[in-house]
Structure formats: C-alpha cells, structure tokens
Amino acid sequence: MKSFDVAIIGSGPSGASAAFELAKSGISTVIIEKEILPRYKTCGGGLVFRGRKNMPFDISSVVEKEFFEVDTYFAKTDLKFTTNRDQPIVSMIMRDAFDHLIVEKAKENGVTLLQNHKVLDISFGEIQTIHTSEGDVQAKFIIAGDGALSPVAKITGWQETRNIIPALEYEVEVPAADFERLSKNVRFDVDAIPLGYGWCFPKKNHLSIGVGVFVKTKQKIDLKKYYADYLKTLGITEIINEEAHGFVIPVSPRTDTFVQKNVFLIGDAAGFADPIVAEGISNAILSGVLAAQSIIESKLDGVLASKLYHEKLENSILPEIRTGVVLSKFFYEKRALRNLFLKKYGQLLANAMTEVFMGERTYPKDYKATIRRKIKEVIF
C-alpha cells in the first residue's frame, strides 16, 4: 500500500499549489486525481493579478491573453466604468493547461501524481486510509481540494453551510468581426441576470461567455434564457460553435470549521471564492499554500496544524470574504439604491474593486459606516 505524509485530493490550483509548497519542505506528498490530466475544467479562467503575482513560478506559457483594462456595465442604465492598470488586471487561462502546469511543477519537487483514482471512501484513524477506484492510499493528513461539491467533505462529515450559487458558461466561437470587437477588453454586465452578472472573457481563439446568480434566492432563474439575452446585449447574432457548461460556485465560507479528522478544506471545498465577483482561483491558491504551511510549521502535528491553519485564515482570507458577503447583498439586492450610489461614486468604486483584484487593498473593515455615510451624501 502506498503511504505518504499528506494526500491531496484534487489537482486544481488549490491542491496543486499545496502540493508544490509541501514538496519544497521535503514532506512526502501525493495528489489523487479522478481524471487523466490535462482535463477540461469549467471555469471563467480569469486569474486576477493578486493571484498571479503570488505564483512561485512563471505561468506566462499558459496565459492566453492579458488585459490591462476592464469594462463594467450596468443593465438598463447608462452606467459604465472602465479601469486601467500597467500590470494585467486579469490574465486569461484555460484550466486544463493552467492546472497541469502547477501539477508538473509539483512533480518536479518530488510530488507523486495518481491519476484515474476516484475516491470512494476514507477510513479515519491515526493514519487515514483513502479507498480509491485503483486501490488504497494512506496518509496522516488529507487536503481536500476537490471542488465545490467536495465528496471528501461529505465523507468526512461536514454539513453544508456555504451559499452555493448556479452559473452557466459557454465556450463560444463567433465570426471574426465579432471576435475582434469583443476581444479587446474583459467585460462584466451587472444585472444581465437577476442578482448577478454576465461576463465576456476573450481567450486565444474564442470567447468564454456566461451568466451567474451571486445571491441566494428562492426564485427559479432560467440561466439559458438570460444567457440568450446576454448574447443580444453583446451584439452576437451568429455563433459558429458553442459548448455549454453548467456549474456551481460557493460564495460564502463554511461556518463551522475547516479541519476535521486531519482533513483540511481548501479552495471551493471551503467556500473561498470572492462573494461579489465569484473569482475563486486566487483564494484557492492562497488557501492551498496556507494549509501546506500549517502542516509544515506544525512538524506534522495534527492539532497544531489545525490551529495554525485557522489562525492563518483569520489573518488573511476570512475577514475579506465575510465583508464581501455583506457587500454582495447590498450590491445585488439593493439595485435602485446601488445605482443611485454609483452615479456619484461609481468610478471610485470601480477603482477600489480593481485595487482588490490587483492585491493593492482589501475590502474596508469599516464598510458599514462607509456605506451609510456615502448613502447619506447621495440621498441628502
């Protein structure tokens, strides 16, 4: 039976980054992946600069396009805001190539990759035994980077406390004239769908176009209908080829814990996507690194590693996400008030969001007082 210090379930950015970090410190690590790499992964593929600048190696070989300008539109209004930076605000990647690159870098550091190994169950104890479709693997620690639905979290015993929202994305080939017109900038269209936005992300030879709902609602929203409407907004009347991918995104973190039975949750399994824009890659990578560092610093002590991980999350990702959850409700649910606010402070807000994307600032801790003060200025 194969045995390791740490088994990482899932080869996405969070899991592969954790593996890379662990291997640098000489900790025996295995990545267990149910697919054969490289594999397609549904994702907008927009890596914001705060995530890219923290990568421990050059990723330019898998970057399809870089965008130094972002346009944000608000449906049924004349509001439009553009922000610019000298560094790429958003780098466009395809997840098959991006994830594979990180895995290969981890393998260069000594990480073992077990592909085509689907996790079936886990026997917990001093040493965990992971039962896969291709045999058993043992490890003291498990890092679960197995995505929004996280079978490992369910097997371990976590109850669902995240807010999980639906999204629909198409990889779209359009005529050359439309591609030329739409491939100049990254574009967001807030309210292209109720309680959410539409996006148009240009890749090397096609567009990734999607719609997502980012606030929990009991109302059933027809994603396909709003996607079709969004194509009209973009001025697309002819499609050469398109491929649909439905998926879900957790836009709030788990509310109980992120470690049980020496199982550490990272990325979407933990609920670390940005609640306002649902960008998840940068926090996925960061959480993977934090989990790895906690295990390294604890010298493989499970209790200490759990304590360190929660402390690191409280000092980095969690305050930002909790603030984002509240701001997201205001942004998407208070539409009339938000638009009134944006007419006076829209460019200021767009610049602030870009600073968050760039890693130059976080969401303000005094956001409630700030919003109240600004709203009073707008109304009175």
Image (tube, rainbow, N blue to C red):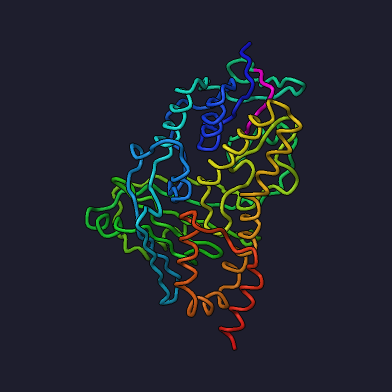
Where's residue 231, x and y in %? 37, 60
Q: Quadrant of residue 330?
A: bottom right
Instruction: Establish if 129 lies above or below 46.
Output: above
Which image quadrant is residue 32 in? top right
Towards the viewer: 24 or 124: 24
Q: Quadrant of the C terminus?
A: bottom right
**SS assignment for the magenta stretch, majority:** strand
- If the image is split into quadrants, where does the N terminus sit? top right
Image point (61%, 13%), residue name = 2
Which residues are the magenta region?
A: 138-144
Residue farthest along the bottom direction in this orientation: 380
Given residues 249 and 327, the one toward you in this image is: 327
Residue 237 relative to residue 99: left or right: left
Q: Residue at x 57, y 68 (%)?
A: 331
139 part of magenta stretch: yes
Q: Is residue 16 above or below residue 363?
A: above
**10 over 320 or under it: above or below:** above
